[in-house]
Amino acid sequence: MKRFVNKKAVTITAVLGLALGGAGIALAGFVGGGSGSGSATTGFPTSFTVSSPIFTGGPLYPGQGGDDIVATIQNATGTSLPLHGVQVSITGVTMNPPGSLYATQPGVPPCTADDYALQAPFPGSWTGGVSNGPIQQGQTLTWNGFGIPIPSGKYVVGGLPATVLGNAFVGPLSGLQLVMLNLSENQNACQGASVQVTVSAN
């Protein structure tokens, strides 16, 4: 018996075969390794940088002297930044370890932030305290910066930009001291205590 083959069907099959073969060759050409690289930007601080305060003057005693507070305030934001103010606050007290001479003695009140104060001349550049003659004192005192623009990379010196060290806010905060008050109650629990102070700029 004679078989008939559809020539049109054969032609289509051949074309499909060529097309698939071509696709196989093209895909093989894209197989391989490669690399790409990019970069991301690290940002600047967004506000004034303030160093941890240190204290000069020695140990504190009730009603005797005081410690100067030393801090460095710098604009490292990459752009000019207005200085509205500097605030200094007593934020806490850590008593001497339990079991020491006075910390757990019956009848001795605990040592708290109320045993200490910030003091500055009155009238003067610091505000927010209660005036007592030529001195004002409080748990928080503020210096007004009046929004003076401080260029990037500059230190705050007396409220004005400067790159040199050794003035109001690069060194001791001008006129400001941390003191221990002489209270009528027993303050023996404050022996050996640590006082925490925070300095902030905005």
Image (cartoon, rainbow, N blue to C red):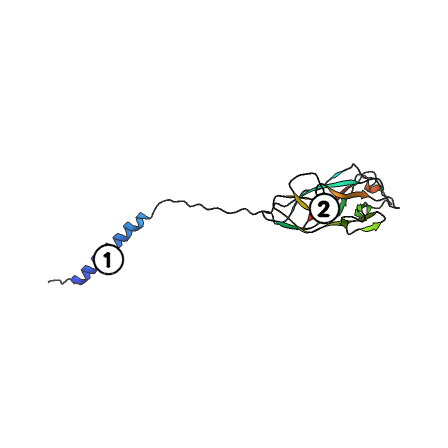
- The residue pinned by badge 1 equals 16
- Residue 126 lies, with reference to residue 61, above or below; the image says below
Single out the mark in the foreground, 1 or 2: 2
- Badge 1: residue crowd in 10 Å (few <14, some 14–19, many ≥20): few
Amino acid on which disc 2 is placed: Thr
Q: Position of residue 63 (x, y in %)?
A: 85, 42
Image x and y of residue 16, in percent: 24, 57
Q: For residue 192, what is the image quadrant?
A: top right
- In the figure, is residue 118 to the left or right of 85? right
Q: Mark 2 or mark 1, which is nearer the start of the sequence? A: 1
* In the image, farthest residue toward the right: 184
Q: CA distance from mark 1 to mark 2?
A: 80 Å
**Kind of residue at disc 1:** Leu
The answer to whether residue 96 is visible is: no
Label 1 secondary element = helix
Residue at 16% of width from left, 62% of height from top? Answer: 7
Q: Quadrant of the N terminus?
A: bottom left
Q: Is residue 31 left or right of residue 123?
A: left
Secondary structure of the residue carrying tag 2 is strand
Residue 177, how many percent across, how many down? 78, 43
In this picture, residue 1 sits left or right of residue 159: left
- Residue tagged by mark 2? 198
Percent coordinates x, y for residue 42 in the rendering: 54, 46
